[in-house]
Image (spheres, rainbow, N blue to C red):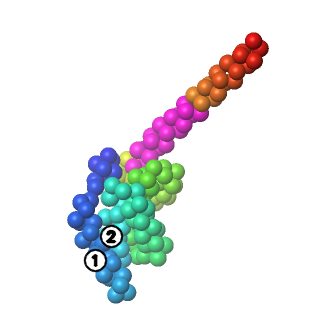
Amino acid sequence: MEEILEDYISPADLKKFEAIYNNQLQNGSVTTKEQFDYAWCLIRSKYPTDIRRGVVLLEDLFQNGDATAKRDYMYYLAIGHTKLTDYNRALDLLSKFLSVEPTNRQAQQLQKYAKDKLKKEGLLGMALVGGAALAIGSVVGIGMALAKK
């Protein structure tokens, strides 16, 4: 799964697909294939801003694109959200995807990856909150001890 999430597009390829998409957009004739290709390139960028734009394009395709390709849009949206560390949204999409296609290995692996990351971040968040509470308690305790002197 890591190889899919760490598959980055070259800047030259991204520019090539961006030029194709923008040219078609100016002509008012963007096909779903061109929009999908550009969105997938954006999802594969190293930059969160690009990934977010790719997610927006994929969400548009999911809502308005070819119904037979919704499965693909949903999977790539889950990848985008995972790369943006929006694991809850990714898990929601993967749950819906797997309810229709429960044996899809790639979706299962991505779901496991997102669950593991969410769990790890949750534990890290709890540790940070616990550490902060301990630090505040120590400061308050020290302050009270000094005030009694």
Side of 99 where 109 appears, left or right: left
Magenta-span inclusion, residue 115: yes
In the rendered structure, which amino acid carries the disc numbered 1? Answer: Ile
For the residues bearing labels 2 and 1, Cβ distance under 8 angstroms: yes
Of 84 and 1, the residue lying toward us: 84
Image quarter for residue 143? Answer: top right
Of 138 and 103, the residue lying toward us: 138
Question: Horizontal and vertical percent for residue 17?
Answer: 27, 71
How many circles with numbers are drawn on the protein?
A: 2
Residue 54, placed above or below residue 122: below
Q: Residue at (43%, 53%) from the top-left corner?
A: 84
Of 149 and 127, the residue lying toward us: 149
Q: Residue at (52%, 51%) from the top-left corner?
A: 88
Pointer 1: residues within 10 angstroms few (<14), some, or many (20+)? some
Residue 70 seen from this side: no
State the quadrant of the C terminus. Answer: top right
Q: What residue does disc 2 label?
A: 38
Question: Horizontal and vertical percent for residue 90?
Answer: 47, 54
Image quarter for residue 104? Answer: bottom left
The residue segment tinted magenta is: 110-130
Question: Horizontal and vertical percent for residue 38?
Answer: 33, 70
In the rendered structure, which amino acid carries the disc numbered 2? Answer: Tyr
The Cα atoms of the two marked residues, 2 and 1, are separated by 8 Å
Residue 123, labelled with which disc? none
Specify the farthest residue to the front: 149
Q: What residue does disc 1 label?
A: 20
Magenta-span inclusion, residue 67: no
